[in-house]
Image (tube, helix red, strand yellow):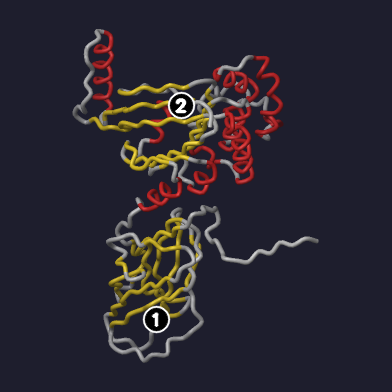
Amino acid sequence: MGEVLIKVENVSKKFAKDFKKSLFYGLVDVFSSVFRKNQNKSLRKDEFWAVQNISFEVRRGECLGLIGHNGAGKSTLLKILNGLIAPDEGSITMYGKVGALIELGAGFNPILTGRENIYNNAAIIGFTKKEIDAKLQEIIDFAEIEAFIDMPVQNYSSGMKVRLGFAVAAQMNPDVLIVDEVLAVGDLGFILKCFKQIDTILPNTAVIFVSHNMPMVSRICNEIILMDHGKAEYQGNNVAKGVDLYYGKFSVGDQNIVFTDGSTEIENFRINGIDGKHEMPILEWNKDVEISFELIFNKNLEKLPYIGLSIFDKENRGVAFLYSEEKTTKQITGNKVKVVFHHQKLQLSKGLYTFNVIINKEKNSEPILRVNTISSFQVTHEIEVWPPFMLETKIEVENV
């Protein structure tokens, strides 16, 4: 790896929750700095640490991933790195030209055309007009908006702004590239093209990449920082470990009863013997899984209702439904039954998932009970992929 291009030492930033207090504290800090008085390092009333004691180095050829839930401090840290706000403590040193895409449309003048904004943004980074002229057509081609390049940016869609912003930030081959979640706005084809461009420039660039999309993070990052309430909860080069810790932070909230006719209740929901209410079950890819729960009815059963179990991912998208062609042969009596789902070789890809319970009188009609997010579970594997399933298969390669 090359020389250090980004050096962050014990950086902290605090904000006040109340707007008026924020203005007042700002004036106090300005006067303290003017008269060289010691600034208040502790939290004052209604203040909180948005970023606290963050330190790291990124060398040329390295990509650092910043992950964490919303409000963890990632965006604040990026704004500090890009010079939009000043830290209250610590120091930041960057070397070379810095390209940043940290906010949709940031740095664009809405009344200027796309072409004019290319010159403005590249000039701010530190490139000369001659250098921009040489790269102009490549930037336009990469952004795929040549038909609209002389139209005011205020008329661009969000996707067009992302295309143009990334094209300027990455095509000029900066020494430092900072990319925020805005890439999620683009379509898959453009995202893949962005990653190919990052692969091209990475050997000569230090990259900081922020995303909630863990396959993206695993794809390009060789180091990772998991932030929580402004602090670095995990920091290191074991990207898979950081991703697993990130998934594990999404704890299960209250059960969401979507519909009930009042006749049925669920108790003792367990995944492989673990009570889903109190501990996040960790399941290994391609291992067998057992899910069990009890159903309590308000009257004795005459006929067993239809019982289904669906699986949703972290983005609340349905990915699977557990189904069996076998019919229950046991004689069911009383008003309480235990239901056990046996599934062999769970091949969901690495990530966080939730179970939803569906109970109908018949297979596709007369709902009795629907409970969403009754329990979460985490699937672990060393490989991170985009699709929800990673299916075990056999691959043969031979000469022809």
Expressed as whole percent of the image width and height from the top left, the position of residue 48 reads 26, 32
Disc 1 marks which residue? 305
- In the image, taking residue 210 as reference, residue 22 lies left or right, namely left
Position of the C terminus, as image quadrant, is bottom right
Expressed as whole percent of the image width and height from the top left, the position of residue 256 reads 34, 61
In contact (CB < 8 Å): disc 1 and disc 2: no
Amino acid on which the number 1 mark rests in the picture: Pro
Count the labels in the image. 2
On the image, which quarter does residue 369 sit in?
bottom left
Under circle 1, the secondary element is loop
Question: Farthest residue in the left direction?
Answer: 45
- In the image, taking residue 180 as reference, residue 143 lies left or right, namely right
| Residue drawn at x 35%, y 32% as measured from the top left | 54
Expressed as whole percent of the image width and height from the top left, the position of residue 389 reads 54, 61
| Residue drawn at x 41%, y 46% as measured from the top left | 242
The crowd level at tag 1 (other Cα within 10 Å; few <14, some 14-19, many 20+) is: some
Amino acid on which the number 2 mark rests in the picture: Ile
Question: Farthest residue in the top direction?
Answer: 35
| Residue drawn at x 65%, y 14% as measured from the top left | 129
Q: Is residue 234 in sight in this rendering? A: yes
Q: Is residue 155 in sight in this rendering? A: no
Above or below: residue 238 compared with residue 141: below
On the image, which quarter does residue 99 sit in?
top right
Disc 2 marks which residue? 6
| Residue drawn at x 28%, y 21% as measured from the top left | 23
Under circle 2, the secondary element is strand
Expressed as whole percent of the image width and height from the top left, the position of residue 393 reads 60, 66
Seen from the viewer's position, the closer of residues 122 and 19 is 122
